[in-house]
Amino acid sequence: MEFCFDLILKEAWKYQALTLPNPAVGALILDKFGKILSLKAHKQAGKPHAEILALQEAYYKLSGDKSILSLEESKEIHKFLKENAKNIFKDCTLYVTLEPCLNEGKTPSCAKLLAELSIKEICIATQDVNKKARGGAEFLENLGMRVIKAWEIKELEGIHKKAKELLIPFARLQKKGAFVLFKYASRLNGSIDGGQISSPKMREFMHNLRSKVDSLLISGKTIREDNPILDVRFATLENKKNPDINILTRMQDFPKTAPLFSVPAREVNIISKVPEFKGFVFCEGGSEFFKTLKPYCDLLLVLITPKFSAEFQKIMQINADCKILHTQSIGEDLALWLQIIN
Amino acid sequence: MEFCFDLILKEAWKYQALTLPNPAVGALILDKFGKILSLKAHKQAGKPHAEILALQEAYYKLSGDKSILSLEESKEIHKFLKENAKNIFKDCTLYVTLEPCLNEGKTPSCAKLLAELSIKEICIATQDVNKKARGGAEFLENLGMRVIKAWEIKELEGIHKKAKELLIPFARLQKKGAFVLFKYASRLNGSIDGGQISSPKMREFMHNLRSKVDSLLISGKTIREDNPILDVRFATLENKKNPDINILTRMQDFPKTAPLFSVPAREVNIISKVPEFKGFVFCEGGSEFFKTLKPYCDLLLVLITPKFSAEFQKIMQINADCKILHTQSIGEDLALWLQIIN
């Protein structure tokens, strides 16, 4: 059981923050013999939820009917399953990191679909914090369905905790209207200077993440020293957009002709104090900038490339104790998601 | 199929180098429905091989007979299975990272046991490089058993490569009589100074590893600057032994009363040039020492603790391009196994 929960948590982390304003969610389906039929994650707001993707693949595995795989819209998959999958899942178990949504949002209710499909057992790692969507577990239980809730089971305490950690970006956005993520890239020996550090795959990942933010916050010093473009040219996701930028600076001592100003469809604001954070805010910068923003940061994202260069010696000179929430291989590099403890 | 191979590779890495002079090996067993019955790794030379541990647990799952779980010696488990498990595995599939051993070494032949148990299918990620033990796959095929060899299947190229990477310590030991591992510990920002860095769980891991080495190689500078004890007091493995130490130094400018000299049952040699490496050699030190040893290093082990301290700024000032072979969470920290590419 823990093993299945671990798998879906790991799958969900692959799309962490890319799903915002939706939560990152993972799901899998076991057949009656305990074999994994599908393992899926929610990828982007507006796209099918993890449960629906897992049901889609599992339906194909159980029925051999490929036609369901061509459906991309959540509504279409819901409709198809309601029409064609009445009994096929009756001995199956669904694992999902988050309580299935009860409400009809951009996509139909997952909880209601699960009820219609009479899935044998539904194992949930944590509750929804969203007032609109929550209640799915209770709804299913009230219908007499078998629901395993990790938060009520002593042995699954660890899983419940991990599932809550996975939800941090979403929960912060829900609770305080903002999720603030500070990111920096370094070599394995910690050096952050000397221009481009990350591998091409990591750059793609970064640009995808950047294309999802509501705004980017950088310092004047970053422009002065690195002069980055901060666009999303390597992003591969649909609907990519160059992020708007807030430049936090007291002195305004950077060239107003820097390349980031000429990126199309972007708004650039110059601000003199830490702003009211709103939405998904992505902060990129060095030691001084981190010190300023540390009290506001929800998570820290460190990208490590497995290289050493004796030439570069500038490191993050900051004080912080962190907890590693997740480690992810991306291309040759490593992405570490960290919670700042102290 | 790839999924199962990935699981056993990951399981095997948990005991990387701890198994020397044996290879790190992982194995799992699926029942006839494709459900995972067991997932195990070889833990220590002389202890049961991964396949045997996987069979032991799977036998219990299939038969409900707990008595097999109390057996610890490989010979006992072999005997028990031969006597009691003639038909129980006939619809099962075994996944294993390395060709099952054909020879009778410290433990009986795994290949011969598998043949007697008539396992339906045996999926192997890579071949054995040990002249004595190899031939298990061919032996099983010649008996008409179904053997899937990842090295002959285009789609499993990646798995085969990963399985060979897992074998590097063992293969080096086999081929050149030595496996040289360089290790250092740092904070997340790369700083390596300021005394104890790793978390308690990581110290335990390190001491376990140290207790398995044939010798430790350090520099005079390490004694001068860090004055470590380099014992195995936190090790939890059986038969732990304080490692013998070679101190590479030209100047001999360190106190001969340093604590490491007073550790019981230890030999300490002072040497003036890089030695002939023999057995599992563990090198611990900083930048200068790494530069000297880089041409001899088979792998690099970097231990990262998720902390930052502005006070400490000494980093590994070296040049190297690496490939991350494996990332492992240990306590709050991270262990990175790296191959030095350049």
Image: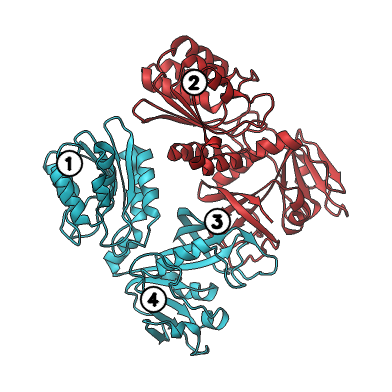
Chain colours: A red, B cyan
- How far across and how far down the image is residue B168, in percent? 35, 59
Q: CA distance from mark 1 to mark 3?
A: 41 Å
Residue that carries the numbered disc 3 in the rendered image: B332
In the displayed structure, does residue B167 sit left or right of residue A136? Answer: left
Same chain for the residues under marks 4 and 3 in the image: yes
Question: Residue reaching furthest left?
Answer: B143
Residue A29 screen position, x and y as percent: 44, 28
**Closer-to-camera residue (B105/B159):** B105
Q: Are marks 1 and 3 on the same chain?
A: yes
Would you place residue A254 above or below residue B222 in this image?
A: above
Classify residue B153 by image quadrant: top left
Label 1 element class = loop
Q: Residues within 10 Å of mark 4 (few under 14, many from 20)?
A: many
How many labels, in total? Answer: 4
The residue under the point 41% across, 75% down is: B216
Residue B109 placement, left or right of A83: left
- Measure the C-alpha gap from mark 4 to mark 2: 59 Å
Name the amino acid, label 4: Pro
Element type where label 3 sits in the image: loop
Q: Which residue is mark 1?
A: B85
Circle 2: residue type:
Met
Q: Mark 3 — on which chain does it sit?
A: B
* Residue visible at 51% across and 68% down in the picture: B184
Residue at x-position 81% and y-position 52%: A220
* Of callouts 1 and 3, the N-terminal one: 1
Q: Which residue is mark 2?
A: A145
* Residue A246 shows in the view: yes
Report the disc number at residue B243: 4
Distance from disc 2 to disc 1, alpha carbons, whole Å, reads 39 Å
| Residue at mark 2: chain | A
Mark earlier in primary sequence (4, 1) = 1
